[in-house]
Image: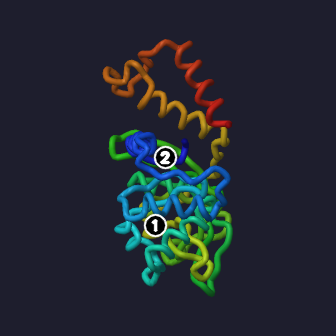
Amino acid sequence: MERYYDLEMANRVKEFESSRSLGVAPAGASEAERWEVAKKELSGLKLGTITEWGFIDFDPDMQKNLVGGEGLSYDEYLELQKRSGQQVRQDFEKAYYENAFVSLKGRIEHINKVQDKVCFNRIYLEGFYQDGNGFSGKEDHVWMERKDFEFYEVGTCLSFTAEIYRYVKKQGKLMDFGLRSPREINEIEEYELPSANELKLQTINKMICKIYCPCKEQCYGEEPCLTNEDWRKDMQKMLLDLYEK
């Protein structure tokens, strides 16, 4: 559930699937057979959806935004996503598909002067959707061009904004999401990253507000919350239990 990056799209996907328009792989079908069914039913649609292989974008128009994928056929593009789906930087992926504005914090871990690149670790991401709502995430590391960071040393912590993009890596074997065109670069003090549970609870609270809250039509995101506190805690527990399954 957490990888439906557009909640309205998630509902449309569920309705689409429940309408029985989709073919279903026969019981006991192999992974290859299940993948062929998915491609047969979804290829060419302007749709990105969760699969057992991760998030797959079936929209052919989105292929042109894949850096390094210019020579791929559409089928090769789908196969690349299938191989990469569970390995990509998922918080970058989320912001990319939400077309979200993001601000970042990172610590310079390595500098490669030969390739003129810099590696950031302990990456903290804050994103803002088009409607003004926000989310947070974190990633382990990312390499970026060094030209905008050439005056900083290893160990320096920086805040900045950047564009998230998709690219082909490992000689065309995998796809991932990276950062480019940094702006508003500032040196900052050391910072703490939120725990996985804190980020998970934040996602759940957003879902409660946007989907389940009976007061969402009267709420403008201001404190105090209009709902009953016990109801909200029960919803948090229920969704957290679903999240863990």
Query: Where is residue 226 drawn, in percent x and y?
Result: 41, 16
In front: 34, or 15? 34
Quarter of the image where one finds residue 150: bottom right
Query: Where is residue 213 drawn, in percent x and y?
Result: 43, 23
In front: 206, or 149? 206
Q: Are marks 2 and 1 in contact (CB under 8 Å)?
A: no
Circle 2 residue:
4
Determine the CA span between mark 2 and mark 1. Answer: 18 Å
In front: 116, or 90? 90
How many residues crowd mark 1 within 10 Å: few (<14), some (14–19), many (20+)?
A: some
Q: For the residue labelled by badge 1, is the local secondary structure a helix, a strand or a loop?
A: strand
Q: Using the rendered image of the protein, determine whether residue 41 is visible from the camera's viewpoint.
A: yes
Q: Quick one: quadrant of the C terminus?
A: top right
Q: For the residue labelled by badge 2, is the local secondary structure a helix, a strand or a loop?
A: loop
Query: Where is residue 102 drawn, in percent x and y?
Result: 44, 53
Q: Residue at x 39, y 24 (%)?
A: 222
Residue 114 vertical position relative to residue 5 in the rendered view, above or below: below
Circle 1 residue:
165
